[in-house]
Amino acid sequence: QVQLVESGGGLVQPGGSLRLSCAVSGSIVSINVMGWYRQAPGKQRELVAVIISGGSTNYADSVKDRFTISRDAAKNTVYLQMGTLKPEDTAVYYCNVNAKPPFGVRKDYWGQGTQVTVSS
């Protein structure tokens, strides 16, 4: 059983910062990709940022230069440091990992989501 537990969401004023964390636990042999997605009301889920096992990163254009993704491989934890937040960043943020379980092929795992609301 693999679990992704997210934390760090909340209400913040425009221009503020938040840090999301996602801890992965359970039976995993290796993690290839860790990332964050978000879904705003009435919109499709979209990629925010990903980090590959080698350390390379990729960001949505809308968050470049404002958000930073990082990981602690020893703790199987991924972080999303969000700065200069805007109202349009309001969404439920989901953690995602692509990982190899002990038996079977690599697959995607999702967290339960954490709400981020940017409002004055």
Image (tube, rainbow, N blue to C red):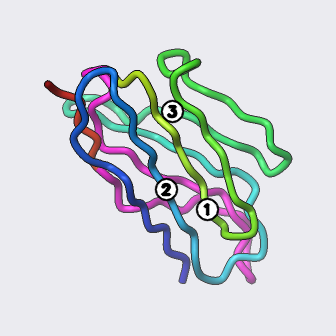
Q: Contact (CB < 8 A) between labels 2 and 3?
A: no
Q: Tell me the CA gap for discs 1 and 2.
A: 7 Å
Q: Position of residue 51 (x, y in %)?
A: 70, 43
Q: Secondary structure at mark 2?
A: strand
Looking at the image, residue 114 lies above or below residue 36: below
- Residue under the point 34% across and 32% down: 44
Q: Amino acid at mark 3?
A: Val
Which disc is residue 48 wearing? 3
Instruction: Indicate whether residue 96 is drawn in magenta.
Output: yes
Disc with the residue nearer the chain's start (2 vs 3): 2
Q: Secondary structure at mark 3?
A: strand
Are there few (<14), some (14-19), or many (20+) residues within 10 Å of tag 1? some
Looking at the rendered image, the quarter that the C terminus falls into is top left
Given residues 16 and 35, the one toward you in this image is: 16
19 sits to left or right of 24: left
Given residues 89 and 46, the one toward you in this image is: 89
Q: Position of residue 116 (x, y in %)?
A: 28, 41
Q: Which residue is mark 2?
A: 21
Q: Secondary structure at mark 1?
A: strand
Are there few (<14), some (14-19), or many (20+) residues within 10 Å of tag 2? many
Q: Contact (CB < 8 A) between labels 1 and 2?
A: yes
Q: Which residue is mark 1?
A: 77
Instruction: Indicate whether residue 39 is drawn in magenta.
Output: no
- Residue under the point 54% across and 83% down: 1
100 sits to left or right of 21: right
Q: Amino acid at mark 2?
A: Ser
Q: Residue furthest left?
A: 120
Q: Amino acid at mark 1?
A: Thr
Q: Which residues are magenta?
A: 86-114
Q: Tell me the CA gap for discs 2 and 3.
A: 14 Å
